[in-house]
Image (cartoon, helix red, strand yellow):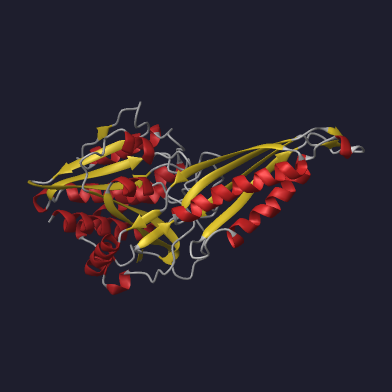
Amino acid sequence: MIEPVSKDKCLPEILALFPDLIAHRHDIHQHPDCGFETQRTIGKIKEFLEKHNVSSKDMDDATCPGSLFVEIKGNLPGKTIGFRADIDALKMKDKSEKEWTSKIDGHAHACGHDGHMSILLGAAEVLSRMKDDISGTVVFICQPSEEKSPVGGAKGLIASGALDGIDAVYGLHVWPTLPSGTIGVLPGPMMAASDHIRIVMNGKASHAAMPHKGIDTIVAGAQFLTAAQTIISRRVNPLYPAVLTFGKITGGTRYNVVADTVEIEGTCRTYHEEAQDAVETYLKDTLKGIDAMYGTESTLSYERGYAAVRNTPSQADFIAGVVRQCLGSEGLADVREPAMTAEDFSGYLQHFDGGFFWLGATPEGNTVYPLHNTHFAVDEKCLPIGVEVMVSLVLAKTA
């Protein structure tokens, strides 16, 4: 049997539950569900909860497809605190080479959401037996489709009104670059806003031997891509970090035909709306200039996806204080920079008070595989620490 990291810091109830959490995680990792199609995962979550005498609440499939709530009422009135875990997987290969590697080809829990839901289930089970210590209500949110940017599962849950009345909501993400079992938290931005960019350039086909009779969208597209790279370096305030990446370009039908259509897709990542606004504005201006120069007719779709995940200073201090109390100062990782990856937990923090933190998920000395890597797998020894911190946060907020 594997031993949890820092097990001396965990409640005995959490350590006793550890084997069940591992078994649940292995099953979910082997059978990953993607997007809103999380029926099997929801079924397994219910199965775990029923085994531990914790009731759950089905959500309306019309407004909250693929979702599940667990509500635990304390024996005294008080605040309502939410804890959210995303439960969907990615459409990619699993090459983690574990005994519990995905059995579904092209589906993988390569972002650690199997770990998140295991932590949620552990916290729900432990807190269900501590109702005398809870003043208020704890709501556990099993959310699908976090990976489906820019739509995401959080938007529908929030819009449905199912969370109305919550005083604060908390979330976490396993983080491979931090030592297993340590907690990372920052005031201000933790993760970036993520926008989806799609450009269609229309020109005129002609024989490759007579390019002057056509309007070459490949050449125009190449000029656009080169010009767009100066937006970050010359148009955006350098105090507002931004990343602009075009990862897909398609166009043309034959090697000897001038291409009459090119499609370009990319993403912009920012922490500040000022940078977001600037990138969108100057992309439009750049595209107009290219159209004027080459005679193309182009359209730009700039779809704003997830906002930046931002902690208020008071919430970051609160989380850090709880971590010091239950894990000691050594439990806090030395985190100095936010990440340019995105998370739809930002949607909750736009509507409710709360906070977000990272849980270290790579054992010391092991190869660090990034999130969304085919070899990434959560170090499950860190899961009891995630449960301990989440239980401690809830007790601190509802004491």
Q: Nearer the viewer, residue 41 or 309?
A: 309
Q: Nearer the viewer, residue 63 or 216?
A: 216
Q: Quadrant of the N terminus?
A: bottom left
> Residue drawn 27% across and 53% down?
354
User: In the picture provided, is 223 more to the left or to the right than 340?
Assistant: right
Q: Nearer the viewer, residue 7 or 251?
A: 251
**From this viewpoint, which residue is outermost toward the right?**
209
Q: Compared with residue 266, is residue 179 higher up or lower down, i.e. above or below?
A: below
Residue 302 in picture, x, y percent from top left: 54, 42
> Residue drawn 30% across and 45% down?
351
Q: Quadrant of the C terminus?
A: bottom left
Q: Compared with residue 179, is residue 227 higher up or lower down, i.e. above or below?
A: above
Residue 26 in picture, x, y percent from top left: 41, 47
Instruction: Give the quarter of the image for residue 206.
Output: top right
> Residue drawn 58% across and 58% down?
235
User: In the picture provided, is 278 more to the left or to the right than 57?
Assistant: right
Residue 72 in picture, x, y percent from top left: 17, 43
Asked whether residue 31 appears in the rendered view, the answer is yes
User: In the picture provided, is 69 more to the left or to the right than 40?
Assistant: left
User: In the picture provided, is 304 more to the left or to the right than 217?
Assistant: left
Residue 36 in picture, x, y percent from top left: 42, 34
Asked whether residue 106 appears in the rendered view, the answer is no
Q: How many marks?
A: 0
**From this viewpoint, which residue is outermost toward the bottom?**
329
> Residue drawn 26% across and 62% down?
314
Q: Nearer the viewer, residue 261 or 54?
A: 261
